[in-house]
Amino acid sequence: MATNYDPRRALGARPMLPVQWLMILIPVCINMVDGYDILALAMAAPVLADEWALGPDALGELLSFSLAGMAIGALGVSPVADTKGRRPAILFCLVLMSAGMFGAALSHGYWGMAVSRFVTGIGIGGMTSTAGAIAMEYASDKRREFAPSAVASAYPVGTIIGGFVAIAVLDEFGWRGIFWVGGMLSAILLPVAWLWLPESLDFLLTRQPRGALAKTNRVLKRLRLPPLEVLPPVAASAHDGAASIREISTPEHRGQLLLLCIAHPLNMFSFYFIINWATKWVTELGLSTAAGISYSIYVSVGGIAGGLVAGWIAGRVGVKRLTVVTLCGMAAMIILFGLLPPVLPLLVGNALLLGAMLFGSACGCWLTIAYAFPPQLRATGLGIASTVGRVGSIFGPLTAGYLLAAGLGKPLICVLLAIPAVLAAIIFSTARRYPSASA
C-alpha cells in the first residue's frame, strides 16, 4: 500500500456504507438515552416535589446535581477518550448511567436522589463529546455535519420517550417507574455498544495504542478499505496520558479554548434553566401534570426538527451564522414563555419554536467547538468546553429556584436568564474553524 494512503481520507471521499450508518446509529441511540436520563427528574418533579414536600430551592438543587456530575464526567472522561480510546470511555459511561438511574429509582430521600443523579450526570457528561466525536469520525465528508447533528437530535427524541413513559407510568407505578425504565434502556445499550461499536479510527491512527495496527486493520476490513502495512508516524507524546491536555494548552489553541469556555457556560445556563423548569411552571399555570409533560414533549418535537435542519443547513449557511441565529432565537422563546397565558395552542407553538432553537443551537455550538481543534484534540477540546459549560448549566436551574424562593415572578426570571444566551451568541461568532484533514 502506498505510503501516502490515508484511510480517513478514503473513508470521507466515498458514499456511506451500511456499516458506517450503524457506527453512527449506536451513538444516536446512546444520546437518545442521555436525553431521557437527564430530564427524568424534571419529568418526575411535579409529583416528587409534592411527595417529598420540596420547596423551589431544594428542587432546584436536586435538578442541578446531575448537571454537576456532567461537569465532572466531561472533565474526567473526555481526555481519557483522547488518550485511552473512545470505545472504553463510552462503555464506562453506560455503566454509570445505568447505576445512577437504578439508584434514583430506589432512593427514599433528598441525598439518595442527589447522589444517584450525580452518578448519572458523570456518565452523561463523559458521553457528551465521545459519542458525537466517533459518529463524526466515521461519517463521509458529505455527511460530516449531519452525523453529529443526528446524534444531537437524538437527545430530544429521548426526552419525548421520557415524556410518554412518564405519562404512562406515573399513575400506576409513580415517579420511580420513570427511573426504572431509564436504567433498563442504558443497560440494554451496553452489550450493543460492546459488540458493534468499534474504536475510533482517528484515535487508532493518531494515538496508536498497543495493538493499534491490528485493530486499525480490523476496522478497515469492516469498512471495506485496504489494510495498512504500517501505521503513519506519530509523535511520542501521543502515548502520554497528559499529552492532549498539554497540547491544547499551547499558544496555538489556548486562546480559542478560553473563548469557548466563556461562551459555552452562558449557553448552557439558559438552556438547562428552561428545560428543567418548564414542566413544573406549566402545571403552575393551572394545567395538569400531563399538560406540563406534554409541553416538554412538544419542545422535544421541535428539537428534533431544529437539530436535523441545523445539521442539513450548517454547511450551506455556515456554522457560526447558524449558532448565532439559533442562540438569539432561544433567548426570544424563553422570554416569550415567561409572558404566555395558560392557553394550550400558544404554549404548543412556543414549545415547538423553543425546541427548534434549543437543539439547533446545540448542534451549532457542538460543531463550532469541534471545528476549533484538530482531530487528535477534538474530544479533549469538547470535553474541557463541555466541563466549563456544565458549570454554567448547574447554575441555570439553581438560580431559577433561588429567584423563585426570593419572590421574583416567572416573567422577570425568564428575561434575566435568557440574557446569557445572547452573550454566548456574540462570543461564538468570533470562533475559528481549524483546518483538518478529516473534517
Image: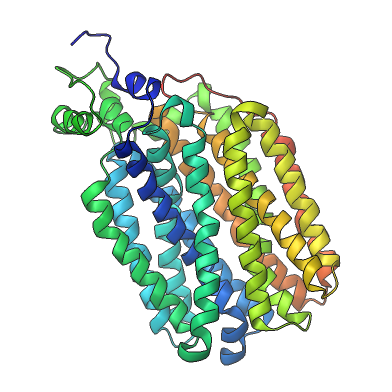
- 82 displayed left or right of 45: left
Seen from the viewer's position, the closer of residues 389 and 369 is: 369
- Residue 218 placed where, x, y %? 17, 33
Task: Tell me the quarter of the image containing the N terminus.
Answer: top left
Colour pattern of the rendering: rainbow
Q: How many marks?
A: 0
Seen in the picture, residue 152 relative to 107 is either above or below; the reply is: above
Q: Give the residue displayed 42% in from the left and 31% down from the top.
A: 377
Q: Give the residue displayed 48% in from the left and 26% down from the top.
A: 142
Seen in the picture, residue 326 relative to 414 is either above or below; the reply is: above
Q: Quadrant of residue 398?
A: bottom right
- Residue 406 placed where, x, y %? 79, 76
- Residue 47 placed where, x, y %? 59, 86
Seen from the viewer's position, the closer of residues 140 and 119 is: 140
Seen in the picture, residue 144 relative to 175 is either above or below; the reply is: above
- Residue 419 visible in rendering: yes
Q: Give the residue displayed 76% in from the left and 61% down from the top.
A: 349
- Residue 140 placed where, x, y %? 41, 28
Q: Give the residue displayed 70% in from the left and 32% down from the top.
A: 321
Seen in the picture, residue 309 relative to 332 is either above or below; the reply is: above
- Residue 261 visible in rendering: no
Q: Quadrant of residue 213?
A: top left
